[in-house]
Image (cartoon, rainbow, N blue to C red):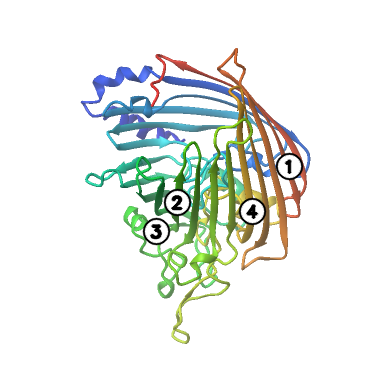
Amino acid sequence: MTIRAAIITLLCLWLLPQGLRPQAKRLIEDVQYGASLRGTFGDGDRAPFWFTSNRYGLGALRNNTFLARTYIKRDIESDSLRNWRIGYGADLAAGYGNHSDFCLQQAFVDLGWKMIRLSLGQKERPSELKNNELSTGGMTLGINARPIPQVRIELPHFWDVPGTKGWFAVKAHIAYGFYTDNKWQRSWAGSGKNLYTRNSFFHSKALLMRIGNEKKFPLTLKWGMEMACQFGGKGYNVVSYTGQQLEQDIKLGGNMWNAFVPGGGDVNDGDAFANAVGNHVGSWHVRLDWAGKGWSVGAYMDHFFEDHSQIGMQYGFWKDMLLGVEINLPRNRYVSIIVYEHNGTKNQSGPLYHDATQENPQQISAKDNYYSHHVYGSWHHGGFVIGNPLLLSPLYNSYMGKGTSMLCYFSRLNAHHVGLKGNPADWLAWRALYTYEKNFGTYDDPVMDPLKGHFLLLEAVYRPRQVKELSITAAYGHNSGTLLGSSNGAMLTVAWDGWLGKKRQSL
C-alpha cells in the first residue's frame, strides 16, 4: 500500500460516525495476531505451479525462497450480535526470492451497520461461490494477485429481502480503488517498447441473488454477475489502432462513471473504432446446491467475458466457461470435501475480429484474447493475473520466450482439476490439488502443438494438541509436461496464531 492509501484510511477513521466512537474500546477485544515463516526448496526451471498460484500474489516463480509474515486483525464478525460493527487488519510480508522483498500485504478497516459494510483499504477477498482452498479460482476476481486498495460498499452476506420469508436474498458490492504496481511495471517493461501503465484505477461491482430457503427446502439457486474495470492513469508505448506509435507517455481516458457504465473510448481507438474506455471484464455466476443431512453437493458455472462479445448468447456463450462440482461428504476420517472443475477457454468468441467499415459493414466482435488488453497490457496486478491462474500470468512470459511483455500469451486452454481435503483428526488436516492443462496459446500467437502441463500439490497441516497456537504445514509440489517443464519442490511453513482480549464470540 502506498502513502496515499494510508492517508485515506486514517482520514476515514477520523471521520467515524459520532455514534460509533464511544464503542471504539471494542477495538482491543477479540484481536487475533500471528506470525509465520515459510521456506521453499526445489529443482527445475521454476517453482511448482501451486506453490506460485492462488496465494494473493505472495507466491514465487523461483524455487528457493523464504518468506516471513506477521499480522494483526479483528474480524468484523466479532460484533455479529451488534448493529454497529468494527473490524481491521494489518499484514506485513518480507523475504528472499519472492516477487517483492517487502510488502504491506493488507491494511484495512471494516465498518458495518446491520447488513451494510464499508470496507476501506487493501484486503484479501475470496472468490465468489467457490471453495477457495480447492478451486482453481474465480475467472474475474480470483485469489491469485495481491489485493488492490479500494473503497468498497457491500452487502457481504446474502440478505433476506423483507416479505419473502427467507426465500429470496441478494448480495452485492461496489468498489473503486487504485493499482500499486507502478514501480514493478516500469522495471519489468524496461527501456524497450513494451506496453505498461502507471497510476491507473480499479473498479468492481457485483449483484448475486439466491432463491431458496435451506431451512425449509434443501435446494437453493444462486446466480448473478460480477464486473470489473481498469481505467485512467498514464500509458507508455501505446500503439494506435492503425499501428502508429503514439507519444511516449499519454494520458488514458475514463472516469468513475465510464467504469461503472462502460462507455467512452480508448485513446488509441480512433473515431471509426470506438471502444468502451478501459479494460472491462466480468463473469456470469450460477450455483445450484442440495443440502442433505450431514452432506451437501453443489454445481457451479463461472462464465467469463471481455467487453460485450461473451456477455450474451451471440458468440457461443456455452463454449467457454469454468464448470465445477463440490461435494461435502458425511463426517469421516479420510476425505471431507471433493471438488472437480473443468475450465475451457478455447473459443473466445471465435478467431476473427472485424470492425464495421464502409466496404464491409458486418461487425464481428470475436477473438477476445482473454485477459490481454491493447492499452493496459492484461488483467493483472503486479504481474499476476487477477482472475484464474490457469491462464498464465505475464510473470511467466520471460520463462516462455515472450520477454517482459504485459500481455497474456497462454489464455486458450482446456483443463481438468481435482481438489481433495480431509481432517483425519483434530490435530491433522490435509489437502491435494491435481490439474491437467492443455494450452493453445492465443489466436494471434498460437501454439502449433498444444502445450501440456501436470500440476500437483500435496499438503499436510499439523497442530499439536499441547500447543494450540502452533501449526506446521509441509507441502510437496510437482510440475511436468511441456507447458511449464519439470520441477519438484518442498514447502515448509511454521505459524503461530494467538488472541488478545477476550475470547471471540462464536457465531
> Closest to the observer: 100 or 465?
465
Q: Amino acid at mark 2?
A: Leu
How crowded pointer 3 is (Cα within 10 Å; few <14, some 14-19, many 20+) is rated as: some
**Residue bearing mark 1:** 478
Q: CA distance from mark 4 to mark 2?
A: 20 Å
**Residue bearing mark 3:** 253
Q: CA distance from mark 1 to mark 4?
A: 16 Å
Q: CA distance from mark 1 to mark 3?
A: 44 Å
The reply, left or right, for residue 403 in relation to residue 285 is right
The label shown at residue 416 is: 4
Secondary structure type for disc 3 = loop
Say which label, 4 or 3, has the lower sequence index. 3
How crowded pointer 2 is (Cα within 10 Å; few <14, some 14-19, many 20+) is rated as: some
Say which label, 4 or 2, has the lower sequence index. 2
Say which label, 1 or 2, has the lower sequence index. 2
Where 74 falls versus 414 (above or below)? above
Does residue 381 appear in the picture of this structure?
A: no
Secondary structure type for disc 1 = strand
Q: Residue at x 69, y 36 (%)?
A: 458
Say which label, 1 or 3, has the lower sequence index. 3
State the residue lying farthest toward the front: 293
The reply, left or right, for residue 171 in relation to residue 388 is left
Q: CA distance from mark 1 to mark 2?
A: 33 Å
- Single out the mark in the foreground, 1 or 2: 2
The reply, left or right, for residue 212 in relation to residue 427 is left
